[in-house]
Each structure stands twice: as structure tokens, then as C-alpha cells.
Amino acid sequence: MIAVTLLSVLLCATCHIALAFTDAEILNSSSVSLLASSLAPENGFNYTKKYENTLETEGVASNDFKWVWGPNCEILVQIPVEVKRPKYPLSSVMELGLLLLLMEGFWSFRQHIWGLQFSEFLERLLPNGNFEYGPKPSQMKGTVVIGPNAIPNWETSGFVEYIKSGQKQGDMLLVVPEGAFAVRLGNEASIKQKVKVIKGMYYSITFSAARTCAQEEKLNISVAPDSGVLPMQTMYSSNGWDSYAWAFQADYPEVEIVIHNPGVEEDPACGPLIDSIAMKALYPPRLTNKNMLKNGDFEEGPYVFPNTSWGVLVPPNIEDDHSPLPGWMIESLKAVKYIDSAHFSVPEGKRAVELVAGKESAIAQVARTVPGKFYTLTFAVGDASNSCEGSMVVEAFAGQDTIKVPYKSKGKGGFKRAVLRFKAISTHTRVMFLSTFYSMTSDNSGSLCGPVIDDVKLLGVRNAQY
Ligand SMILES: [Ca+2]
Ligand SMILES: [Ca+2]
């Protein structure tokens, strides 16, 4: 019999985190690898494999350590006592972690749990969200998937194809953004998956999609009762794949994510390819005494795939106010692009917004102001280091005032700061940014691009002597 030591590592502060994986769901895939990488190797661990709920460590047999969510939303670490202990006992590491937790306090711990971004517990690919597990040969006819449950973890309906990277469609070679497989949704086809969530919490979904035919395509994404239409007629990346974000508020502890192609084309195989569907919990940003705008640094936003280099499109937010870019509304017809510092040049922090569609894409936020009082709106304007060259202009609006900020981009990154001083005329002031011009990358791909904005701050002016 295996005696088990249970260590409650994370207590109340992490309750909502653990609940995101509700019902003592076993940590898997990215969560385990994050947890594992955070423990190794400086703490004497060297995880060589991860699968299911088990972390296999070097020199120690598998099934040594199990990580599960406990009933009180803590992480439980189970250690069979016969296990040959690694260099430093796990318990010491855990106790040290707990001590660090207490010392650092909640907020810093939120950012550093053994050097691990706290929020990453809430970011993950959906089970088989990259479609690398496919139907059995008997469940396919050519590339067409037969039966609703052929693709593990997913339920499909309509004309769904399972596509292997490198497959040809006419003259076009189909490539896949993650792994070797993706799905294609034909006319009226859909894929869906049930996901456990925290009721009342906001979530963003990010997925990658590519058009395969010339005509206008769009996708419906829904989590009842919310739904959105993502237009795909404009391509922004150079390889045909774009990632899209969409957000919803969970009305139930379990929701069903549905992606549906409402198309009615002559060729049923004419439909978008889908791959890499991920989810991330969003924290509604709070106002601080340093900024009257929420999420002015854009650090809170949708999941960005670490292995894709084309950013995430935040589509125009027409139908609801659940923005995947918390605090911000996407106005007008086209998307804005959410970019990360791992793949782009970002003025401040790790995330920013690229205004990719000229005047057709604008971001806005409404702030509470006092009529007659003076304010300053400061922000950074730059380029994403994505070969987007030329003269750019960002127009900023605050109430009735506006400023045009020219920026000369060499396409290699960089930014400047700008300020708009204004006198509020209302109890609510709308702050908005757009790009005056359309830009395209100089790599001949025809990709739309534009100026980057970041670090937006709105503050009242005490002494309005200007
Ligand atoms: Ca894939
Ligand atoms: Ca930022």
C-alpha cells in the first residue's frame, strides 16, 4: 500500500485559480509543464516527461509525484513514501514556497509562484485543441470525418474534414500552424467542446483560422447565450493564418464552445481551416490612482500562442461588451491586432495593440471625468518591428479634443510618447485611437499593418496652467 503525503501548497489566495480546473481535475499538459519547469532544475528536480497527472523525474520512477486540485481548491502534491527522494525533498521545496508566499504577500506572489506567471494556470489549449489526435481510419472517408465523435474531445456536425499539413488543395499546399493536423469546417459545419469554468468569470478564446477559398468567409463562435461573428475577408498575416480572439462571461459552471461555419458555398469543402483553440480567464482590470483608464498598458488580454508569430486579432466588438481586451472597445469595421513582446517590438511591458486597418479599426474607452476639469492623455506610439515602414499617424481623441501624432517607422521597432491635454466637457469622456493611414508590410506579403499604441494613461491635472 502506498502511503501518501499530502501537502497543501496554495491556500485561499489561489482559490479561484484552482477552481478554473474544477472538480479536482488533474493538471495536465501545459499546466504540468509550467509547474514542472518552475520546480526544475534549481530545486533539484529535473522532469523529463509529463503525461496525465504524473511527472516523471530523472532518476525516480514514474508515479512518484501526483499533482491534483484538492477539494478546497488547493494543489495537492502526493508523494508515495517509498520513493527515493531527489536531491532536495519535495516537502522542503514546498515549505520554502509557502514561506516565500507569506513573505512576498499576495500581489507579488500573484506574479511569482516559483517564477511562474500566476495567470498561466488559467491559460491553456483546450483538450485536443490543436487537433493532433485524429479520427481512426474507419471514421474517415478520404479527408471527411464520419460521425460526430470521431475527433477526440470534440463533437462535430456537418461537413468536417481532418486535414494533414502538406495536403494539397488544387495548387495550394495546406499548412498547419500547430503540429501536423487541423480541421476544416465546410458549409454549416461546426465543432464543439464542453469546458468547465467558473460561473460569472470572463474568458477569452483564441484560435487560429485560415481561408482556403477566395470568397468571403466568416465564422460564428458561441458560448450560449453569447455569440459573435468573426469576419475573415481580410487577411492580416503573410501565411494565410490569423489568430482570433473572442470573449464571453460564463453563465454556467460548464459551458459549450461552438465554432460554426455559416457559409453556404457551392463547394462544401470551401471553408476555413481551424487549429489551436485555447482559453484564458480574463481579470476585469481595475482603475488605479495612477490611471483613470482600465488596462491602459494592454497587459491584460487574450491568450497569445507562444509558437505563432502573427499576433491575435481582436475583432470589432459589435454585439456585446465582453471585450477580449478588457476595458477596451474595438470600434468600427475591422480588427485590431494584439501583439506580444516575444514576437514584436512592444513599447512597454509585454503586450500592446497594433492598429492594422487604418481608420477602419479604432479602440476606445470611456472614462469618468469632471466637467470643466483638465486632464492629460499620454500614450506611446511606435512600430511593431514587423517591416511596417513609412509615415504613420495616430489620431487620439478625448471628448472634443484631438491630436495627430506622426511617427516615422523604419519597421524595426521603436516608439515615441505623446500627450493630449484637454478640458472635460462631460461626466464621461470617450478616449479613442485610430490610425490615419493604411499601411502594408514591406515584405511583399500584402499584410496589413500599422502603428502600435501602448501605455495609455489618463490623469487629472491639478494645476491647469497651460
Ligand atoms: Ca494542429
Ligand atoms: Ca503594454
Image (cartoon, helix red, strand yellow):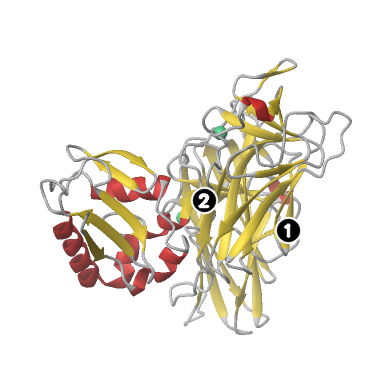
- Tag 1 or tag 2, which sits nearer the N-term? 1
> Closest to the observer: 148 or 383?
148
Quarter of the figure that contains the N terminus: bottom left
In the picture of the structure, the residue carrying the numbered disc 2 is: 303
- Determine the CA span between mark 2 and mark 1: 19 Å
Q: Residue at x 87, y 38 (%)?
A: 264
Q: Name the quadrant containing residue 67.
A: bottom left
The residue wearing badge 1 is 227
Q: Residue at x 35, y 45 (%)?
A: 33
Q: Is residue 213 left or right of residue 117?
A: right
Please, what is the three-letter code of the amino acid marked with disc 2?
Answer: Tyr
52 to 399, vertically: above or below? above
Regarding mark 1 in the picture, which secondary structure is present there? strand
The kind of residue on which mark 1 rests is Ser
State which mark lies toward you, 2 or 1. 1
**Structural crowding at the residue carrying mark 1, measured as other residues with C-alpha within 10 Å and reported as few (<14), some (14–19) or many (≥20):** some
- SS for tag 2? loop
Q: Position of residue 301 (x, y in %)?
A: 53, 57
Could one spot residue 212 in this view of the protein? yes
In the image, taking residue 67 as reference, residue 181 lies left or right, namely: right
